[in-house]
């Protein structure tokens, strides 16, 4: 292959995106909007979902295994569209990978620091994400003076997956989890889980208009655009979204498709084996 | 070994018990109460919990892999202390195993048929359990005339794992799921998930005193006792409970220990690999 042919081939390779399940489709939807020329290969690890209550070690191992599947699809860049995996596996993936890798936490932290006026930021996420303190580290790396209030919200993902998006029960759970955040007088709240944008309306209803919601999806897509640089697909292309899941059962998929207005089409089933770190080239 | 020595050795082998997570400890607790001389080796597949929203194929594969780990511990009998795995994996396990295997569904169905006076039984469980119609088949095999009303309750496990056992949110979710069951005028309700006994009080509060709750744990333990026969441990022994998990993270373990009054002690970490059916001897 001539150098220019090799470059063309590299540009046509897909962006690899993964999440523990379906939630990361919020990121895939943002990528489709911002980068319509790019092919996207998305894997949801629905055979082992959720990651949010599992140990750092297990989350790292799963992330490596799913990344190996994306590399087998020639991914030119890896997007970790899962806050839990971003919080716990990115350092190890960065060590192992030859292609660029980007998560949702640093872009979210950057947007939150840009948005806050009073220097007080709230962060909500899964138990594993909050315990990792990854958002705190990322925010303080940008501005050590910011005051952060964090709250794990383990019930929100099940509520979203049950499709109870506009629901009195969900409102009550939101109130319980977010009271502490409101009392801390934050003016910015990071939605630190890719599912949470689906709760934007009930969150806004509870928090009122004065608190800015920072959603990792759009910010991550913008960061991917910047990171792609010369690897970006030619503009005149029409990109395609392929979605693969590690388990065939996904009652939540239709909820997500409808809420995101995303055309997922046929979903592929991809078996996950213990691929291990060796195959990450 | 002489035949009598071999028999003694067989009797001293542990009962192998597994669940997708911690919920099956309700069954382990019932076994400890009824069969204090038996050693119990319990595995919770917390690395892949929950099973309840996953496909039949994946649930069967996971059940086979965990059973292989129990057989490696010389289990003399396998108890599937998980309704979802009982509903979807027992037929295949029965084909593959040389040791007896018992689940929670048949004992629960038997107890429900014995308890009902008006011939109307309700069943609640995970999405996978209810979709499998395993309870309907087991109940109708005993009495084809029984009228069954089933309801998947996907929010109950997350609520229990969050420790919201006496809680207004939980009461509200119970009301929503169980209205249909109450309207069907059942007099017996099968708690078709090993977590649900932890919600016995709020369920009773909503259902009132006229509906009998059938809990698979105690009924399964009684069935195990019967099935053991000559494999039962000598009565003068003091049995031991060992608990192993496939992932180290288990914020729910302390909730379960407290609610069950169960001394779990040190928990072992056991890695799960794709053991496959080959090792099931």
Image (cartoon, coloured by chain):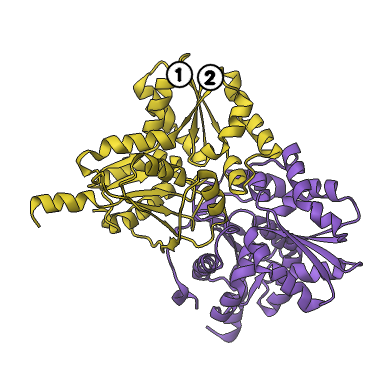
Chain colours: A purple, B yellow
- Residue identified by numbered label 2: B186
Q: Is residue A67 visible from the viewing direction of this image?
A: yes
- Residue identified by numbered label 1: B116
Secondary structure of the residue carrying tag 2 is loop
Q: Nearer the viewer, residue B126 or B6?
A: B6
Q: Where is residue B75 in the image (x, y as percent from the top left)?
A: 28, 52
Locate the N terminus of chain B by quadrant. bottom left
Looking at this rendering, what residue extends furthest in the front direction? B236
Q: Do the residues labelled 1 and 2 touch (CB within 8 Å)?
A: yes
Q: Is residue A33 visible from the viewing direction of this image?
A: no
**Residue drawn 54% across the image and 79% down it:** A96
Secondary structure of the residue carrying tag 1 is loop
**Residue drawn 77% across the image and 69% down it:** A109
**Residue drawn 43% across the image and 50% down it:** B58
Chain of residue at mark 1? B
First reached walking from the N terminus: tag 1 or tag 2: 1
The image quadrant of residue B102 is top left
Disc 1 residue crowd, few under 14, some 14–19, many 20+, Cα 10 Å: some
Chain of residue at mark 2? B
Q: Which of A42 and A231 is in front in this view?
A: A42
Up-down: is A134 above or below B175? below
Looking at this rendering, what residue extends furthest in the bottom direction? A3
Q: Where is residue B270 in the image (x, y as percent from the top left)?
A: 41, 62
């Amino acid at each position: 292959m001539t150098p220019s042919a090799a470059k063309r081939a590299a540009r046509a390779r897909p962006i690899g995106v993964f999440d523990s399940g379906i939630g990361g489709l919020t990121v895939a939807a943002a990528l489709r909007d911002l980068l319509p020329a790019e092919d996207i290969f998305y894997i949801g690890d629905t055979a082992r979902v959720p990651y949010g209550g599992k140990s750092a070690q297990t989350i790292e191992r799963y992330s490596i295994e799913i990344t190996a599947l994306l590399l087998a699809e020639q991914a030119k860049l890896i997007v970790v569209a899962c806050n839990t995996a971003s919080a716990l596996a990115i350092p190890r993936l960065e060590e192992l990978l030859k292609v660029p890798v980007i998560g949702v936490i640093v872009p979210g932290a950057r947007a939150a620091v840009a948005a806050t006026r009073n220097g007080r930021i709230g962060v909500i996420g899964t138990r594993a994400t909050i315990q990792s303190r990854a958002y705190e580290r990322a925010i303080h790396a940008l501005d050590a003076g910011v005051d952060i209030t964090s709250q794990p919200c383990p019930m929100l993902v099940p509520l979203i997956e049950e499709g109870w998006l506009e629901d009195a029960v969900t409102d009550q759970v939101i109130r319980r989890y977010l009271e502490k955040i409101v009392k801390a007088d934050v003016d910015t709240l990071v939605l630190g889980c890719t599912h949470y944008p689906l709760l934007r309306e009930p969150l806004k209803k509870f928090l009122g208009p004065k608190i800015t919601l920072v959603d990792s999806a759009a910010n991550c897509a913008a960061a991917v655009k910047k990171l792609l640089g010369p690897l970006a697909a030619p503009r005149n292309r029409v990109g395609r979204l392929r979605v693969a899941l590690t388990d065939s059962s996904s009652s939540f998929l239709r909820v997500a498709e409808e809420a995101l207005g995303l055309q997922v089409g046929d979903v592929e089933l991809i078996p996950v084996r213990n691929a291990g770190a060796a195959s990450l080239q």
